[in-house]
């Protein structure tokens, strides 16, 4: 009985944390303070003679052997709490209707409790044809068996599996596990043992050039660079630490609120170092950001916070936002003379300081 009680306690802790992971970004300002994505330092070159009509612009693309109507993924956010079921369901409906991708939050909770599986499984129910990405933390990966991984991917009938690296969050989280020794070897094993494409992602502190090279050598199919400049998970965990009077963790959260590699830097640095597919994320907010990331070398782009904000209101709000993203992207493609996503990836741009300064070192 003591083991059952311990498991129940662990589930309740995770449910509470997942709920706070929704509530805090929606009710508190936990966006980056002094750090930006530095995408404002990327200037796309206007094409005054594009030689195409607006209705010729095609946003479709192929990513991991799946055709998307636009290079957009609703990034991994939530699950593991009943409140997440509604939000994930709304987001999945958007992904299905527009034929874009979607990831779910860490599925550890679904492994621990059958009652929480629905908060993840709902996405496949609502999006039978969409490209869906399962998700587990690198720290948790060390304790999971092949059967556990299969349960995670089967939970949403996933098209790919993401392993998230969140060392900053684990460091500041009151109940965090900053134990990252051995994760790389588990990623290598995972690539060999799982038939689905493996994606490795950060959660807002960015992927550096050396980490990207190691991940490419491990055989992962895509890297989500998830740079700094958007939601600060150090900030989220600082607030959670305040709520339980953990003064040291609160101090670290304040100190490291803006820690990380800006999105534009992480993207450029990674693209220049590997040929692996790249997902750009971290503070992207509109179609112009998406276009800039494609020009810098991203294969597809992912957004989390704005989708969460809109899906919390309603499915229609999230759908309207996604449609607006696509139209914004189409407008920028037209203005750069880009008929296709391939053309957009070859669009001319200039880099301004301080982004340019990162590459003078």
Image (cartoon, rainbow, N blue to C red):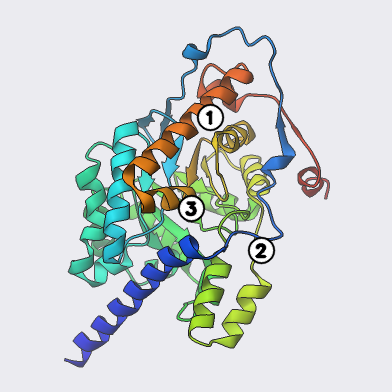
Residue identified by numbered label 1: 328
Q: Earlier in the sequence, mark 1 or mark 3?
A: 3
3D distance between C-alphas at marks 2 and 3: 17 Å
Residue identified by numbered label 2: 258
Q: Nearer the viewer, residue 304 or 134?
A: 304
Disc sitting over residue 305 in the figure:
3
Q: Quadrant of residue 270?
A: top right
Residue at the bottom extreme of this rendering: 2
Q: Nearer the viewer, residue 83 or 122?
A: 83
Rendered location of residue 317, percent (x, y): 38, 42
Q: Nearer the viewer, residue 211 or 22?
A: 22
What residue do we see at 56% from left, 9% from top? 52
Residue at the left extreme of this rendering: 1
Q: Quadrant of residue 45?
A: top right
Q: Are marks 2 and 3 in contact (CB under 8 Å)?
A: no
Residue at the top extreme of this rendering: 51
Mark 3 lies on a secondary structure that is helix
Mark 2 lies on a secondary structure that is loop
């Amino acid at each position: 009985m003591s083991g059952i009680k311990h498991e129940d306690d662990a589930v309740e802790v995770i449910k509470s944390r997942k709920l706070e992971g929704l509530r805090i970004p929606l009710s508190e300002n936990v966006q980056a303070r002094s750090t930006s994505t530095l995408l404002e330092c990327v200037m796309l070159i206007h094409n005054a003679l594009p030689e195409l009509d607006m209705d010729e612009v095609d946003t479709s693309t192929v990513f991991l052997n799946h055709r998307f109507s636009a290079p957009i993924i609703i990034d991994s956010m939530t699950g593991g709490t009943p409140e997440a079921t509604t939000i994930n369901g709304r987001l999945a409906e958007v992904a299905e209707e527009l034929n874009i991708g979607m990831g779910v939050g860490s599925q550890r909770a679904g492994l621990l409790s059958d009652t929480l599986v629905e908060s993840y499984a709902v996405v496949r129910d609502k999006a039978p044809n969409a490209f869906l990405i399962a998700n587990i933390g690198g720290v948790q990966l060390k304790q999971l068996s092949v059967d556990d991984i299969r349960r995670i991917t089967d939970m949403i009938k996933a098209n790919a599996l993401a392993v998230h690296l969140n060392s900053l969050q684990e460091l500041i989280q009151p109940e965090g596990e900053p134990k990252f020794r051995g994760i790389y070897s588990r990623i290598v094993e995972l690539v060999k043992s799982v038939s689905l494409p493996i994606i490795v992602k950060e959660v807002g502190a960015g992927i550096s050039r050396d980490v990207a090279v190691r991940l490419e050598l491990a055989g992962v199919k895509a890297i989500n660079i998830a740079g700094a400049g958007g939601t600060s998970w150090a900030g989220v965990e600082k607030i959670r630490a305040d709520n339980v009077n953990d003064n040291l963790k609160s101090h670290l959260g304040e100190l490291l609120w803006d820690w990380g590699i800006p999105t534009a830097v992480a993207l450029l640095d990674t693209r220049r170092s590997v040929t692996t597919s790249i997902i750009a994320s971290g503070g992207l907010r509109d179609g112009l950001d998406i276009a800039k990331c494609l020009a810098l070398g991203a294969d597809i782009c992912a957004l989390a916070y704005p989708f969460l904000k809109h899906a919390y209101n309603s499915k229609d709000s999230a759908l309207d936002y996604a449609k607006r993203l696509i139209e914004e992207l189409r407008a920028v493609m037209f203005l750069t003379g880009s008929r296709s996503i391939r053309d957009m990836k070859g669009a001319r741009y200039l880099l301004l300081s301080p982004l340019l300064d990162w590459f003078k070192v």
